[in-house]
Image (cartoon, coloured by chain):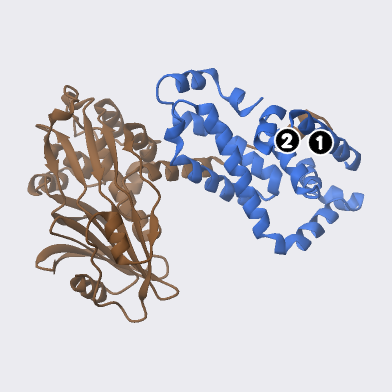
Amino acid sequence: MTPETDLPAELLSQSAAAAPDWDAVYAEQLPKVYNFFRYRLRDDSVAEDLTATTFEKAWRSRESYRRDVAGFATWLLAIARNVATDHVRGRRVHAPLEDAEAVRASGTPEEDNARESDGDRLRALLAQLPDRERELISLKYGAGATNRAIAKLTGLSESNVGTIVHRVVEALRRDW
Amino acid sequence: MNDQFLNGLRREPAPAFARQLKSRLHALDGPAVTEARSPMWRWLATAASVAALALAFTFPAVRTAAEAFLDYFRVVNFAGVAFDPQRMAQLWSSSSVDLSTLIGQQVTPAAPPSPPVAYSTVDEASAAAQMPLHAPSWMAPGFTLSSIEVRGEHEFSVQGNTEKLQSVLDALGITDVSVPTALDGQTVSIQIPPVARLVYGDGHDQITLTQSRSPVIALPAGVDVASLAEIGLRLLGLDRAEAYRLAQSVDWRSTLLVPVPATTATFHQVEVQSGTGLEIEIGGAFNGARGGSLVLWSNDNVVYALGGPVRATDALQIAQSVQ
């Protein structure tokens, strides 16, 4: 689903007529943005911080989307992408430590067994992906965006998004 | 590994996080005479929210036209009211009422606030603020002017909803106050003129002088403000007799009541620039590791707030030197 089709029909109908119920929009969009960051950055507490930053940036201007709640949802993900990019740039200096954690996560079976869950293991694998591929996976599976929506957000073609996502999932499956 | 597995890493945000963020977002919608950047300002924002709640739910249903706004409120005086934050917390924790959400549902921005803009000189900022800005001629040792910013004028309106207010009172167990049913559906308009902040820093701490022309609150004609204020005071945790006494003794057309947490701060009236102001001294336990002071006063239709991690005597001296 695209961010557009993720929105319940009642919200969309509201967006075409009266003022939207922003609390409902918030409840709908918060898990998408939060999970985008969880897939993208691995650390839950950082995901919370960046989710808050994203909503705070968007919230003041949400009234300009009074008649286009779907536009607000897409715009929110665009802000989230920028916030994530800024965060990643800002912590480049810590990359060696991050890489070390990722290597350890795909180490011996004994080490793997010690990890808390499949989720941790998957996030460790995601941490090894190049930024662009990890972002696409985060949008696709974290935020639940469709290839079309991802294409709109990233500037890639829809088919290109599909190809890259398919290739990355295959690679993850091999490394699992 | 398939789509279902990859989707399985999703988690719902922690409820506490979701709730707190929502409150913060709704707080962004409210009036912003001061920024909520420190515990002191956060407390003031909370106090303002409580006062706004009383306004939010309490205006008559019959007339909504602009011509109904015959009564106007301007800040001329400040008065403190002590409240027990623990008592208030107990009151609110006994229900699932989300104050920020309730206020947010009732507020409509007519002209949303623009982000603050930084200026390099007081003259430039004065032009942006559409008023001559004043600066202290004396400052605490080590502090120098570090930034100037102006937030543009904005307006919002608050829709009265007596049913919601009554439900809040019911949820809080306040049963000896009745909300006037005739006050439903009316709109209160609130105009916040440009707000300027002069920030003085010493490399670690900040002292801030905030100034603005008085906010203007247009009330529907005939509103019994005292009875509404009494409800607001009850929501702060004051008992019935105390709330009634205060509500009847304050001139609500010209006085901004500032709730002060009695366990962590003290307040008293002070003479500032030939007028009467309010000085609040905040203990260290409230303001993180260190205490602080806040002086509020108005002069010539301009409202001032001077605050920072300084002693009360220094804060008052700075306020006196503003010219």
Residue occupied by mark 1? A164
Q: Please name whichever residue, B133 or B271, is drawn nearer the observer in this view of the structure.
A: B133
Residue A13 lies left or right of residue B190; in this view the side is right
Residue placed farthest to the bottom in the image?
Answer: B141
User: What type is the residue that disc 1 sits on?
Assistant: Ile
Disc 1: host chain: A
Residue A156's mark?
Answer: 2
Separation (CA) of disc 1 from disc 2: 10 Å
Q: Quadrant of the N terminus of chain A?
A: top right
Q: Is residue B165 above or below residue A103?
A: above
Query: What is the secondary structure assignment of the residue under circle 1?
Result: helix
Residue drawn at 88 percent across, 39 percent down: A171
Count of marks, rendered view: 2
The quadrant of the image that shows the C terminus of chain A is top right
Quadrant in which residue B221 is drawn? top left
Say whether marks 1 and 2 touch (CB < 8 Å). Answer: yes
